[in-house]
Image (cartoon, coloured by chain):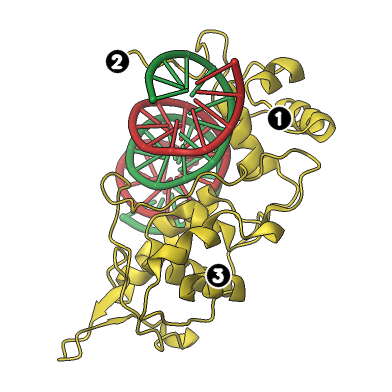
Chain colours: A yellow, B red, C green
Amino acid sequence: MGRIPCCEKDNVKRGQWTPEEDNKLLSYITQHGTRNWRLIPKNAGLQRCGKSCRLRWTNYLRPDLKHGEFTDAEEQTIIKLHSVVGNRWSVIAAQLPGRTDNDVKNHWNTKLKKKLSGMGIDPATEFRYEGTASGYVLGGDGDQGTSMWSHHSMYSGSSGTEGGRPALQEKGNDSVGSSGGDEEAEDGKEGGKGASDMSGLFGSDCVLWDLPDELTNHMCD
DNA sequence: AAGACATCCAACCGCATAAGG
DNA sequence: CCCTTATGCGGTTGGATGTCT
């Protein structure tokens, strides 16, 4: 079925962004915000698709982004949250200030998956089979002393979104990071994305981890 | 030194859904 | 309420860079 392309591919540039393009986008958004992604490339004088601009902004240009290595604490958070929400990168990223869903996803796929596999943990479930009657436990990472995890993965193994996505209401919140150059820092306004969506996931046997209070509270409510 | 292979990350694609008319 | 459009999300890809042989 003819799905309308997000933009006419003919007059649209693709591939790596140049520093000039970055500058144009950055200065336009700084002045005008991110009201309408369709108009932004046109008004900013960019031969790019709005979608591409949005991605560039959210994943790279946003001033509140961190670009360096993931810290151990961040990795722990990702692993823990992944065991709960599965591949819902935006939910996980919402708990990591300065990180984007793309960042988290890439980091997971390139580093953490291997790390977990190397520890004998199935990255899809974060379970390690101990070979005892006690069954599965969430794997610990030796030097980090994370073996205290003992939680059952309530929502995991959904390596694809198709069919695996629970009926969480994720939308309806303000669009993340799209409120413009003068936007409030996304991380500060939790209650929005992610956290609020988790409430339905956690029933009676909620286990507290050392997650951010905000999230934990939502989980265990 | 050079080619092959592996890894990483930015960007793209297409679907789902919210928002607006 | 239905239809169209815009946006957000997750999966995937491709190119740049690093490492090995």
Neighbour tally class for label 1: few under 14, some 14-19, many 20 plus, Cα within 10 Å: few
Could you tell which of marks 3 and 2 lies nearer the N-terminus?
2
Which chain does tag 1 point to?
A
Chain letter of disc 3 in the image: A
Q: Nearer the viewer, residue A185 or A111?
A: A185
Q: Which residue is mark 3?
A: A215
Residue found at the very far right of the displayed protein:
A31
A34 on left or right of A30: left
* Amino acid type at image mark 2: Met
Disc sitting over residue A1 in the figure = 2
Residue linked to disc 1: A35
**Residue A53 appears at what percent x and percent y?**
63, 29
Query: Quarter of the image containing the N terminus of chain A?
Result: top left
Q: Nearer the N terminus, badge 1 or badge 2?
A: 2
| Residue A92 seen in the figure | no
* Tag 3: amino acid: Leu
Task: Check the image and report above or below for A62 versus A141.
Answer: above
Give the residue furthest to the bottom: A133
- At x 50%, y 19%, the residue is A6
Query: Numbered disc 2: what chain?
Result: A
